[in-house]
Image (spheres, rainbow, N blue to C red):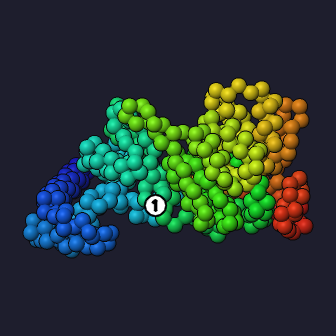
Amino acid sequence: MTTMNQNGARMSREKDSSHNEFEDLKRLIHGKLVDKLDLSRLGDLQGDTLRREIRLVVEHLCDTENPLLNRSERERLIEEVLDETFGFGPLEMLLKEEGIADIMINGPKHVFIEKDGRIQRSSVTFRDNAHLMQILDRIVSKVGRRIDETSPMCDARLPDGSRVNAIIPPLALDGPSLTIRRFGSNPLTLEDLLNFGAFTPEMVMFLEGAIKARLNMIISGGTGSGKTTLLNTLSSFIPGDQRVLTIEDAAELQLQQEHVLRLETRPANIEGKGRVNATDLVKNALRMRPDRIIIGECRGGEALDMLQAMNTGHEGSLTTIHANTPRDAVSRLETMIAMGGVELPLKALRHQFASAVDIIIQVNRLQGGPRKTTHITEVLNMEQETVIMQDIFLFAQDGIDEDGRAFGHFESTGVRPACMERLEASGVRLPSNLFSARVIG
């Protein structure tokens, strides 16, 4: 037993030594590459052409500094040096890997990923805090943001649309921390979500008709439940001849229409001036002749402006909100409006909500990772001080399988939506048995 422990310790030391040597060689070659680059000559080269030119230089440096590298080590070294030069360093390996939903970096040596609904530790590391900060600066500077001690928190996005949240010391005690929500350069399609069992064809048929009939919708759900993905998918039903305005803190929506105008909030500058929040953008959007307004996420005082826009001729607007049930979504909106400093009687506020919002779509992430549309709920009207709602479609969980993943079935509640007259007036024809009480999907 002692001999086995000694052998294990020796192998671990050899592995660490080999890793350190590889990292030292990579830093050496990267430093020499920076010294060799003739920026004036390379200035006219773009994209893949520039990368090919630099690759030739890196290959020559590899052969010069360590000609004994085997083919796989040499190729890995070249790719990592190119990633350090053009991309996001060690992050590139994770961004290229399929199936990763989230990347969580808790300091330079602790990188975790979520894959197949489970969080696991990654072998990827950064050299130190300075290396991680260098990559972080590269990310935020590409979208005109900044992160430093005076502004230690930041929302940004990657070129493929993935969302990045970063927080650095002194607020983050263990070094710079990044949380990356992956979206990918190819957004999930309606067929993808149907294949994943996120909803059923019957539910899609109703939601497509509701969007074409310009019903106002709120997508409600918790963190990581798939709200933005569903919003992207549903937006594909918006006719191409309509003018759509999107408002986001960090632009991540990937709408497919041609006539889309994207607006993004702006943080304050180093003097604390110049901040433009979502409320400002919603007010400005109303002067830009939109057919529909899409707010990536309602999280503050813009909620009231959004409800007013829905009530004043901008039908068919959509937004997302953090809430666990359709009923919670109403309470959450009330809280956000109150936090915005607007003093409205509760009854008036709820009446505003009931007249503005037609459909609430609830999405939840169940145990083990599956994301389901658990409620499609219609908002009807007010009775005294209560918003009356009715469920059209539901997801019922039946249990947990041997892999720890929740499973269940979708069902139609048997309620014919009150909005069917609006759908039919818009030329939407749905099967007569679509809403009969039964298990669907």
Residue of label 1 = 160
Residue 429, visible in the rendered structure: yes
> Residue 292 falls in which quadrant of the image?
bottom right
Q: Within 10 angstroms of label 1, few (less than 14), some, or many (20 or more) residues?
A: some
Q: Is residue 362 above or below residue 159?
A: above
Q: Is residue 159 above or below residue 313?
A: below
Quadrant where the C terminus is found in the figure: bottom right
Residue 197, visible in the rendered structure: no
Task: Give the x, y percent position of residue 434.
Answer: 85, 64
**Foreground residue among 420 and 205:** 420
* 79 with respect to 390 (left or right): left
* 307 with respect to 140 (left or right): right
Q: Is residue 385 above or below residue 432?
A: above
Q: Give the total number of marks visible in the rendering.
A: 1
Task: Give the x, y percent position of residue 18.
Answer: 18, 58
Residue plotted at (48% across, 64% down): 185
**Foreground residue among 50 and 263:** 263
Task: Give the x, y percent position of residue 182.
Answer: 48, 56
Task: Provide the secondary structure element on which disc 1 rests.
Answer: loop
* 254 with respect to 90 (left or right): right
> Residue 153 falls in which quadrant of the image?
top left
* 60 with respect to 268 (left or right): left
Residue plotted at (58% across, 39% down): 280
The three-letter amino acid code for the residue at tag 1 is: Asp
Task: Give the x, y percent position of residue 224.
Answer: 57, 49
**Foreground residue among 76 and 417:** 417
Residue plotted at (65% across, 59% down): 243
**Foreground residue among 259 and 429:** 259
Residue plotted at (59% across, 66% down): 258
